Image (spheres, rainbow, N blue to C red):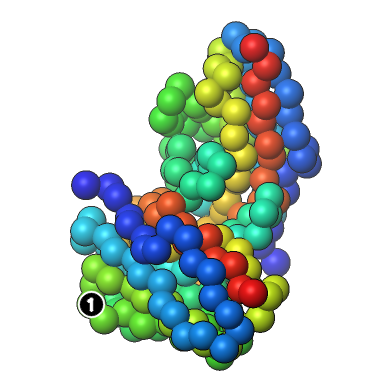
Amino acid sequence: AQSVAQPEDQVNVAEGNPLTVKCTYSVSGNPYLFWYVQYPNRGLQFLLKYITGDNLVKGSYGFEAEFNKSQTSFHLKKPSALVSDSALYFCAVRDPGRGTYKYIFGTGTRLKVLA
Amino acid sequence: DTEVTQTPKHLVMGMTNKKSLKCEQHMGHRAMYWYKQKAKKPPELMFVYSYEKLSINESVPSRFSPECPNSSLLNLHLHALQPEDSALYLCASSSPGQGPSGAYEQYFGPGTRLTVT
């Protein structure tokens, strides 16, 4: 079965420090991986995706993610955290077994950036 | 325009009421989704429409009835809901596609906060 795991419920980081939000996946075939961010009482916003090609993917708001096939990971990173980055982050994978429409979400990681 | 709109923002309904949630997008996306999200949990897929046809129903109770009148609109009709149905209901859309070039991201609306009393 396809799945994604976000091992940390919460990540705390000081403003200006680098941040990492972890995601590991388990899929058969080529993984199509996504990161979304959700602010309180809002919908999810797309940050970036990995489909194929360069393992380092750059996305919105200075975020990037590194695809590591051997470790089956897709960690989200940012070189310098902002207080405004505090939000709930979801990793997702497209389930190839359900055509193009089934996306499996991780449990989410709450990022708290401390001033 | 990369916006998905949802109305109403908030809805309080009794267990005997009938109400509808509405979703609209004008990005030309031909796949539209309904998700249910409980607090601090990931979204749970309910329904997917592709080219205005129901593609996925994740065994959702019949008190939830989706409708896709055209390629821009998606409705969710609610009837005889239970208090445990209280949640944030999210609509999303994406381009459909096959293979690597078709792994499109989803665009989400802000959601409807539903409370069933």
SS at mark 1 in the image: strand
Q: Where is residue A19 in the image (x, y as percent from the top left)?
A: 64, 21
In the rendered structure, the residue with mark 1 lies on which chain? B
- Asked whether A66 or B30 is in front, the reply is B30
Q: Quadrant of residue B68?
A: bottom left
- Asked whether B31 or B113 is in front, the reply is B113
The residue singled out by tag 1 in the image is B70
Q: Position of residue A36 (x, y in %)?
A: 52, 43
Q: Quadrant of residue A7?
A: top right
Q: Position of residue B65 (x, y in %)?
A: 46, 85
Residue at image x 48%, y 50%?
A: A43
Amino acid type of the residue that numbered disc 1 sits on in the rendered structure: Asn
Q: Quadrant of residue A23?
A: top right
Query: Would you say residue A13 is visible in this rendering?
Result: yes
Q: Position of residue B75 (x, y in %)?
A: 37, 76
| Circle 1 Cα neighbour tier, 10 Å, few/some/many (<14 / 14–19 / ≥20) | few
Relative to A19, say whether B28 is above or below: below
Q: Disc count in the image? A: 1
Does residue B62 appear to the left or right of A106 in the view shown? left
Does residue B102 appear to the left or right of B83 in the view shown? left
Residue at image x 60%, y 45%?
A: A90
